[in-house]
Amino acid sequence: MVGSHIVAELLTRGYRNIVVTVRSAQAADKFRLKMKSMNVDASSVVTCDVELCNPHEVNELLNEGDILIHCAAQVALGSGNGREMIETNTRITSVLVDCGIRQKIRIMVHMSSIATFESREYPQLTDESSFARNVSSWNPYAKSKFYSENQVWRGIRSGLN
């Protein structure tokens, strides 16, 4: 959902050579329909089914890349396997960070979630100055985003922009 809006904006601003990763052919079709519903010509956009937890596939994808925008995540706010979601989301980000460093990606943009912030005192506004105090009590999605964001910070310490 977020990714389709980012792609639409990039196309509107004249960016080309956009590659979008999808989880299936069905997801690629949904992406195309979304672009059409937004009246955006996405005919130049390449969709590819890449296993984001596989560093070999990601390295191949980023081989000629310049900018990496990461907004992929497994989302399950209700029931589901929380441990799997935490591991998957953290692994995806870790692989993208490592491959971004290896491929010397010029810029990596990581879309996270307000779930990684904790308000100092309810009902005050939660913003970037808020910080996590008790991650152990968070729901699995929030934990997964927090751990993923830590992978990005690790990448920044290793030279990722």
Image (cartoon, helix red, strand yellow):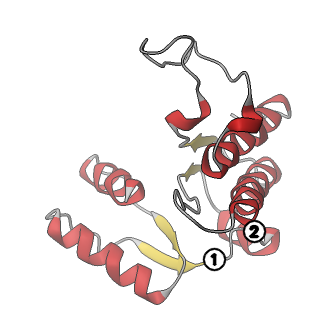
Looking at this view, is 153 or 145 the one in front? 145
In the rendered view, tell whether residue 42 sits above or below residue 3. Answer: below
In the rendered view, tell whether residue 160 sits above or below residue 127. Answer: below
Give the residue pinned by disc 1.
50
Percent coordinates x, y for residue 113 in the rendering? 52, 39
Q: For the C terminus, which image quadrant? A: top right
In the rendered view, tell whether residue 89 sits above or below residue 144. Answer: below
Which SS class for mark 1? loop
Amino acid type at circle 2 is Cys
Give the residue pinned by disc 2.
53
Using the rendered view, name the quadrant where residue 23 is placed. Answer: bottom right
Looking at this view, is 114 or 32 the one in front? 114
Badge 2: few (under 14), some or many (20 or more) residues near its Cα, within 10 Å?
A: some
Query: Gap in Å between the C-alphas at discs 2 and 1?
Result: 9 Å
Q: Is residue 160 visible?
A: no
Q: Is residue 49 left or right of residue 160?
A: left
